[in-house]
Amino acid sequence: MKRTLLAAALAAVSLAGATAQTSWVYDFGTNTGTFTNANSSSTTFLPDPPPGGGSARVRVGTNGGGFTLVNPGSGSYLSGAASTGTGTTVDKFSIYDFADPTAAFSVKFDAKFTGADAGSWLFLAGAGATFSNNAALANTQVFAGLKWSYATNGGILSSNRSGSAWKLTTNASLLQDTSYMFEVVGNNGPDAIVYRDSFTLAAGTYDLWINNGLVAAGLGKAGLSNGTPINSFMFYGENSPGNAATIELDNIVYANHVVPEPSKIALLALAAIGCVGYMQRRRIRARACEIPRRRRDRVWWHV
């Protein structure tokens, strides 16, 4: 019986390990510096992501802008100035090809938009060469697309890329010179996902959280094929006169999963491990009782 329970526990743990999920915390460190070289890219300007967390890359196009690591005294953040152009002239910061991707993902980050009355910064998540090359975004490689457009009144208009078009997300309008914590939670799989106990993420959609509040649920995806594992994301600056549209980024956390309700496999593993532990405790108690009896037998024998 003991061996059977132990085998069940090991099998359950093995199955749970097969569906292991990973999160990565990306820290910009403490260094400072600028990367503004026209029509160039680098995978060494920024700190490396943690093991399995993919590669970090910056790219500056032919129309100015670029990236700066700024340390105000408590660690660095990344400041990006958008290109004046579009298409192949855009500026990109990406983390791509992280390990063990699935059709579900999460990305959390702090962002602040400053300095302009025109131009855009985009957040894009998906899979494909668009996250590591110098070309314009490839819609068929993008699952989640958010666009923040700088407005003349000091505001920021938010849009979602649904299919191949941008659609205004009216309940996610923002202000410049204000820090926000964003979280994008996406599901490119065939089944709905329940996360945080009570939120349902339908297949082929993503949710947008700002400052720990759900502001847009069930946003439609862009052109990435259904079921494609998502292993990359990037920030993409374009169309800013004078390179004035600036974004400040920090505290990036990303994962190859959405945290669901406990799975049956995990529950099975816990139950099997619990049974083995219970049997072990019973065996220890039994031995504790047997030892005194044996000692008493020897005592009575010698008397």
Image (cartoon, helix red, strand yellow):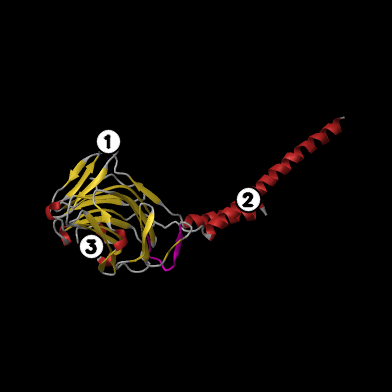
Kindly give the residue lying farthest to the right in the view shown: 303
Q: What element carries label 1?
A: loop
**Residue at position x 39%, y 61% in the image:** 104
Residue 221 vertical position relative to residue 36 in the rendered view, above or below: below
Point 17% across, 62% down: residue: 87
Few, some or many C-alpha atoms within 10 Å of disc 1 (few <14, some 14-19, many ≥20)?
Answer: few
- Residue 117 location, x and y as percent? 17, 55
Nearer the N terminus, badge 3 or badge 1? 1
Mark 3 highlights which residue? 137
> Which residue was labeled with disc 2?
276
Relative image position of residue 4 (x, y in whole percent): 64, 56
Q: Residue 168 is drawn in which quadrant?
A: bottom left
Residue 11 visible, this angle: no
Residue for badge 1: 73
CA gap, disc 2 to disc 1?
52 Å
Q: Looking at the picture, which amino acid does disc 3 mark?
A: Leu
